[in-house]
Image (tube, rainbow, N blue to C red):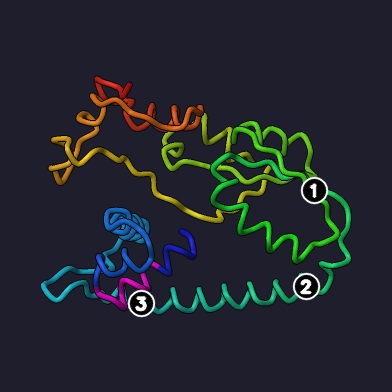
Amino acid sequence: MRIEDLEFLIEVSQSKSITLTAEKMHISQQGLSQLISRVEHDFKTTLFTRCRQGITLTEAGEMTILKAKEIIEKYNELLNNLESLSQLGTHSLTGSLTLYHSHHAAMEVIPRALKIFRRKFPDVKLKMVECAPIEAISKIREDPSTVGITNFPEAYYHDNKKISQYLNPDLCLTEICHEDLYVCIPKSWPLAKKKNITRNELGKQLMVYYDTSQYEDIVSIIFKENQEMPI
């Protein structure tokens, strides 16, 4: 479980609404519902009950939210302490650092992180190299003095080979963000008028996505049980 999951649970307990929480936290309603179900499955108990007035906490839910707030408070305290500690010697660091990153990371993560890095480590020369995620992991294993920002699709959790390739025990991995992947279709399509679409229905459609092996892997894993695969 991630700190972000606890924050979602706390927000739901306060707003008593999946819809309002999803809008405020910038997550899909389906994604939020799945998150709650996953946490309840992990805890082997029901945290929320649904009624006309919205969502209410069960007794187990109240206990969970109370502890979640304590955990987040301790987590934020730790971050502040580490930030203060790092500021004591950051400006004395010199040298060079190579950062391997995916194309997606270059658009979403790096622009924000780069400003912070340059402010904290002005004397460190940063070299950025764009490459495929699996290549970045290989480079980092070869040279422990390098770092990387890459993607790990949730679909890979169902593929033991991908897990062994990406979640390598030789590497220290930290999740820095979580993003949903959406399928977009024209409003004029018959499928657009349906509330729910099956994978079999999507498998019969033409698809356009980034020309990378990772996106091909995601599509293959999602539709591997289908009789038809997207073209």
Pointer 2 and pointer 3: residues touching (CB < 8 Å)?
Answer: no
Q: Disc number at residue 159?
A: none
Residue at disc 2, secondary structure: helix
What amino acid type should be assigned to the residue bearing mark 2?
A: Gln
Main structural element of the magenta stretch: helix, strand or loop?
Answer: helix
Residue at image mark 1: 97
Q: How would you rate the neighbour count of disc 1 (Cα within 10 Å): few for under 14, some for 14-19, many for 20 or more?
A: some
Q: Looking at the image, tell me whether mark 1 or mark 2 is earlier in sequence order.
A: 2
Question: Magenta part of the protein: which range?
Answer: 8-16
Residue 131 against residue 29 in the figure, above or below: above
The percent coordinates of residue 57 (x first, y second) are 26, 75
Query: Spatial distance from mark 3 to mark 1, Cα to Cα?
Result: 45 Å
Using the rendered view, name the quadrant where residue 99 is placed. top right
Using the rendered view, name the quadrant where residue 141 is placed. top right
What amino acid type should be assigned to the residue bearing mark 3?
A: Met
Image point 62% across, 52% down: which residue?
A: 110
Q: Would residue 13 be counted in the magenta stretch?
A: yes
Residue at image mark 2: 87
Residue at disc 3, secondary structure: helix
Disc 2 vs disc 3: which is toward the camera?
2
Q: Looking at the image, tell me whether mark 2 or mark 3 is earlier in sequence order.
A: 3
Which of the pair 193/14 is nearer the observer?
A: 193
Residue 31 against residue 166 in the figure, above or below: below
Q: Would residue 105 be counted in the magenta stretch?
A: no
Residue at disc 1, secondary structure: strand
Which of the pair 208/50 is nearer the observer?
A: 208
The percent coordinates of residue 48 (x first, y second) are 25, 69
The percent coordinates of residue 195 (x first, y second) are 15, 46
Image point 57% across, 75% down: which residue?
A: 76
Which of the pair 103/13 is nearer the observer?
A: 103
Residue at image mark 3: 63
Q: How would you rate the neighbour count of disc 3 (Cα within 10 Å): few for under 14, some for 14-19, many for 20 or more?
A: few
